[in-house]
Image: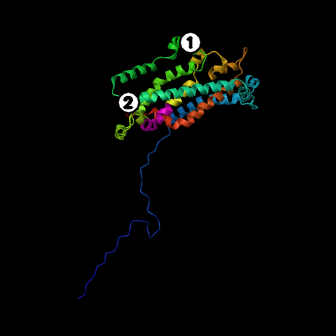
Amino acid sequence: MTSVSTATTPTAPAGPDRTTGTPDPPPRRGRLRRGFNWLGGLGAGVWFVLVAVPLYFLFVTSLRSSSEYLTDGPLAVPSGLTFENYVDVLTSNFPRYFLNNVIVAAACVAIVLLLALPAAYAIVRSRNRSVARAFSVMLLGLAVPAQAVIVPLYLMVTQLRLYDTLLAIILPTAAFALPLAVVVLTSSLRDIPNELFEAAVLDGAGPARTLVSLVLPLARPGLATIGIFTALQAWNGFLFPLVLTQDASVRVLTLGLWDYQGQYGTNVPLITAAVLLSLLPLLVVYLLGRRYLLAGLTAGAGR
């Protein structure tokens, strides 16, 4: 009696064709074809021209002599470059004006950050109606322009004997920047989960400890945002320095540029060199805080 055993032949896995050696074609995948956005490209090109032409004018004009600028025109390609304008600016009163601007901007940023963060923390965590009403009153500061209160502000500064001092510029600038700073920080702090505050309370942390250990690290994007905006507002401020100061020792850059305007004409290359030097700190501040800027502006957008 013979037993026949049947062996099962294993099935070869799918792969390349062994007879021809040609690999199997890859599976087809749908590809999303998108055409070029001509409208967006046109808008980007127009925006580039609007930004590039003034920068080109500032940079090229600052490296030209006044006679060449008057002869060839503002947008002509310079035949020769010179750094005499920068030397003249740095040997004038520009360093003093620059230092005054740095003091004003740094003081305004420090005051706004020190006052806005506790105020926003109280608004977010407090359930007191008086705090909510105070926040509503503070929001009115966003609707009041500085030009509308410049006369009573001048009287207050003179009565406090602060006229012709840097404090006369610092205090009003910080006061007008404070409402926007509180709004931005309030939106930023509302994104912090309530469970973190409850955990801090369970660990025995009081309001001050929670503010320093929990709120301050998580509010860095909002702090960077209001710091940049406050610095820009203080650095480019013109109305308060014009009305509340007079002495050249407390003059800031926005008023110091008048020194390069003569009685019978204006030295445009010299002014453009001073303008470019005054823009450098703003560029540095933006490059250092740009990664926090968008996060601070979009804080609370999902609520």
Q: Quadrant of residue 54?
A: top right
Asked whether residue 15 appears in the rendered view, the answer is: yes
The residue identified by callout 2 is: 124
Task: Give amino acid for label 2.
Answer: Val
The residue identified by callout 1 is: 158
| Magenta-drawn segment | 212-225
Mark 1, other Cα within 10 Å: few <14 / some 14–19 / many ≥20:
some
Asked whether residue 300 appears in the rendered view, the answer is: no
Any magenta on residue 214? yes
Q: Is residue 226 left or right of residue 253?
A: left
Q: Quadrant of residue 238?
A: top right
**What sort of colour scheme is used for the picture?**
rainbow
- Magenta-highlighted stretch: main secondary structure? helix
In front of the other: 249 or 176: 249
In front of the other: 70 or 274: 274
Whether residue 13 is situated above or below residue 50 in the rendered picture: below
